[in-house]
Amino acid sequence: MLIRRVGIFLAVATLITVLDLVTKAWADARLKPDDSTITCVGGYLDFKYNTNTGAAFGLLSDSKWGPTVLTLVSVAAGGFLVYLAFHIDERPVLMPISLGLVLGGVLGNLHDRIFNDGKVRDFIDAHVGNSHWPLFNIADSGITVGVILLVILSFFPGKKYASKKKQARPASA
C-alpha cells in the first residue's frame, strides 16, 4: 500500500507542477509582452500577467530578505511533505492526493523563485464585478485546495492501529 500511496502523491505533485509551469509559460508568451488582459468569463474570470516577490496576500513582499526566506521555507515544506507521504499509513486516498496538491504548488512557485529572480508569476484574476481576489496561479490553487482537504481530513482520523491478532479474552469463571 505504501507504493500505491507514494505513487499517487508523486503523480499528483508532478501533474500540478507541470500544469503550473506550462500555464505560466503560456502567460509569459501571451500576456506579458503587451500587458494584455484576456477575459475568459465576463465579470468573473480574466487572465492578466503580474509577478510578486511575496507570499499569499503580499506577505514579505516589501522585505529585502523575503524571496530568500520564502525559498528556504519552500524547500523545508517540500521535504516535510515528502516525509509525510512516506508515513501516512492507512489514511484515505485523499491524503496522498492532498499532500501531492500542496507539494506540486510548492514546487511550481519554488521554480519561479529560483529561476525568475525571486518573483512568482501570477495570471488568474478571479472577481465579481470590481471586487477582485488577489491574482494567483495553478500552484497557488494546488496549495489552497490541498490545505483545505488536509484540514477536512484532520477531522476524520485514520483507522486505529490495533494489533491484527485478536487478543484472547480471559476465560470467565
Image (cartoon, rainbow, N blue to C red):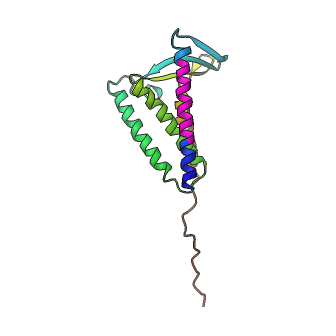
Q: Position of residue 81 (x, y in %)?
A: 47, 44
Residue 166: tell me if it is visible. Answer: yes
Which quadrant of the figure has residue 9? Answer: top right
Q: Position of residue 25 (x, y in %)?
A: 53, 21
Q: Residue shown at 38%/27% (left/top)?
A: 60
Residue 156 is a magenta residue: no
**Residue drawn at (57%, 40%), measured in percent from left and top?**
12
Assign the magenta stretch its main secondary structure: helix
Outermost top residue: 34
**Residue at the image position 53 percent from the left and 8 percent from the top:** 34
| Numbered marks: total | 0
**Residue that lies at the very extreme toward the left in this rendered image:** 64
Relative to 55, say whether 45 is above or below.
Answer: above
Rendered image quadrant of residue 76: top left
Q: Quadrant of residue 63?
A: top left
Using the image, determine if residue 41 lies above or below residue 102: above
Which quadrant does the C terminus fall into?
Answer: bottom right
The answer to whether residue 151 of the structure is visible from this angle is no
In the image, is 148 to the left or to the right of 56? right
Which quarter of the figure is the N terminus placed in? bottom right
**Residue sticking out furthest to the right:** 41
x, y percent for residue 146? 55, 40
Q: Which residues are magenta?
A: 11-27
Membership of 20 in magenta stretch:
yes
Q: Tell whether 157 sits left or right of 69.
A: right
Above or below — where is 147 with respect to 36?
Answer: below
* Nearer to us in this view, 62 or 82: 82
Q: Nearer the viewer, residue 170 or 48?
A: 48
- Residue 77 percent location from the top left of the image: 43, 40
